[in-house]
Image (cartoon, helix red, strand yellow):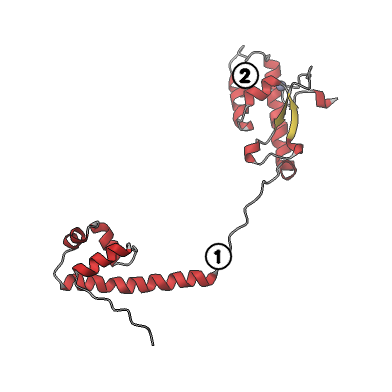
Amino acid sequence: MEINHCCYCGRELVFPVIETAEHIIPRSRGGNSHKNLQPCCYWCNTWRSRADLRNWRMEIQEILNEEHRTKPPYTRNQLEIIIKKIDFWINYINEHRSEMIVEKDPRPKKKINPQIIQRKKDIIKQRVEFCKNIEKIRKESGYTNNYLAEKIGTDPFNLSRLENGSYSPKLDTLIALLNELNIQIEFVKKQ
Ligand SMILES: [Zn+2]
């Protein structure tokens, strides 16, 4: 019965109970279906470990490329059998992947409310307009970027970004800046 043979080297599993079950597609890549499980000998399971089948195949091929070389406990003949089996499993995966993989709890995609996106765009627009005024007043006051940045305890780079509207400062930074430029903002209810 095929079930008593290693899925790679074909060795008969003498003690199937203590031999391992091999995940042809690693569990980390979704191979959670029972159809992905195959009987496997201790040696093959340990050697392959989590390697990609193609990488494992290359490793074995490199050994075979050197005359007389082998990897105990395998004979060269057994290594050739493993390579053929790996090719078989690569084909098998191509044809049966969907049955071998069980997606674990796929996360539902968040729906983004288009109204919220529009609101954010509007706010950024307002920010850019607001900040243009800051740059204008700074220049009118004769402040350089570096000087003002130092005065309010921020980075000149951040101040530039603030002035072109690409950076949203902390409220404390904004208050310091308004104080320094002697700008007063009045809160007036819109009519
Ligand atoms: Zn084996």
Q: Picture quarter containing residue 16?
A: top right
- Tell me where residue 37 appears, x and y as whole percent: 74, 33
- Tell me where residue 158 appears, x and y as whole percent: 28, 59
Q: Picture quarter containing residue 99?
A: top right
Question: Can you identify the residue that label 2 sits on?
Answer: 64
- The mark nearer the N terminus, 2 or 1, is 2
Q: Picture quarter containing residue 34?
A: top right
- Tell me where residue 168 appears, x and y as whole percent: 34, 64
- Mark in front: 2 vs 1: 1
Q: Nearer the viewer, residue 118 or 75?
A: 118
Q: Horizontally, is 50 left or right of 153 in the view? A: right
Dot label at residue 2: none
Farthest residue toward the bottom? Answer: 191
Q: Is mark 2 within 8 Å of ligand 1?
A: no
Farthest residue toward the top? Answer: 68
The relative height of residue 63 versus residue 170 in the rendered view (above or below) is: above
Q: Horizontally, is 123 left or right of 115 in the view? A: left
Q: Amino acid at mark 1?
A: Ile
* Residue at image point 26% right, 62% down: 159
Which element carries disc 1, helix, strand or loop?
A: loop
* Residue at image point 75% right, 23% down: 6
Q: Quadrant of the C terminus?
A: bottom left
- Tell me where residue 138 appears, x and y as whole percent: 19, 70
**Crowding near pointer 2: few (<14 within 10 Å), some, many (20+)?**
some
Question: Can you identify the residue that label 1 sits on?
Answer: 112
The relative height of residue 25 versus residue 123 in the rendered view (above or below) is: above
* Residue at image point 67% right, 15% down: 76
Farthest residue toward the right? Answer: 1
- Taking the image as four quarters, which one is ligand 1 found in? top right
Q: Quadrant of the N terminus?
A: top right
Q: Nearer the viewer, residue 7 or 60?
A: 7
Which element carries disc 2, helix, strand or loop?
A: helix
